[in-house]
Amino acid sequence: MDKEIKINVSDAIGISESISISTESNYLLISNKEKVAYLLNNSDLNQNDIIDVFIGLHIILEVGINTLFRQLISPVLKEKIDIHEMVENLDKVNFIDKTIMFIYYSRFDFKDLDQAGRFHSIISKLRSFSEMRNKLLHGHSISTRSENGVNTKSRLAKNLNLNKLQEQLLNFRFILEGMGFYLDSLNMGVTDAGKKAYKESFLDYSFLPITHFGSE
């Protein structure tokens, strides 16, 4: 069954004289969170499981961040601009590029400059995080070659291991924490209630099992 996100945009941006409800499918977020959580609770992950986790994590991250930006931008539209045309134009922009623009061009009220500097690195972490998914979905070789009794693996196959998985999980959590920090610091008309709702809907990582995968 399709699942939906419903956020009262008027409450999120603090406008009482108008009412706007944004409804979006939440299926990809929910289904992939359930799949990833199920796989990570399996203590004996094989190569195929790890591939599914890598792809699932990327879907959760990209869908969540893209949906967040649609929610943030929709309320500032001027009259006579078709919202669906705006969404299509916005969706054509890579989610990493949108994140960079968000960090560099938004107005923030930072209460902790050290944290702001620390979370600036989510830009580079997004690029390295996406690299794994891109290689998998673009058909890079996952192969093992045996010659004269010696087995060698392709570069991608070497990265399908628990150490790389832990690295991806830590980066995943750090990126979402960083986005939550910037959202909380945003000084552009989003209410505290709206920020809380956005974080719970699009920047949540509580589905990760409390194991060594999700801890530092």
Image (cartoon, helix red, strand yellow):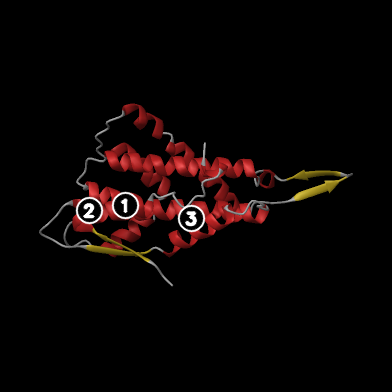
Quadrant occupied by the N terminus: bottom left
Q: Residues within 10 Å of mark 3 (few under 14, many from 20)?
A: some
Residue bearing the label numbered 1: 198
Q: Residues within 10 Å of mark 2 (few under 14, many from 20)?
A: many
Please name the amino acid that badge 1 sits on: Tyr
- The answer for how far apart the CA atoms under marks 2 and 3 are is 25 Å
The mark that comes first in sequence, 1 or 2, is 2
Please name the amino acid that badge 3 sits on: Ile
Point out the residue furthest to the left here: 17
The mark that comes first in sequence, 1 or 3, is 3
Which element is circle 1 on? helix
Q: Is residue 77 visible?
A: no
Q: In the image, is 120 to the left or to the right of 105?
A: right
Name the image quarter holding residue 87: bottom left
Q: Is residue 122 above or below residue 48?
A: above
Of marks 2 and 3, the one in the foreground: 2
Q: Residue at x 74, y 45 (%)?
A: 153
Which element is circle 2 on? helix
Judging depth in this view, the residue of 9 and 123 nearest the camera is 9
Residue bearing the label numbered 3: 59
Can you give x and y, in whole percent of width and height, for residue 30 in the image? 44, 61
Please name the amino acid that badge 2 sits on: Ala
Point out the residue furthest to the top here: 114
Judging depth in this view, the residue of 186 and 130 nearest the camera is 186
Residue bearing the label numbered 2: 12
For the residues bearing labels 1 and 2, Cβ distance under 8 angstroms: yes
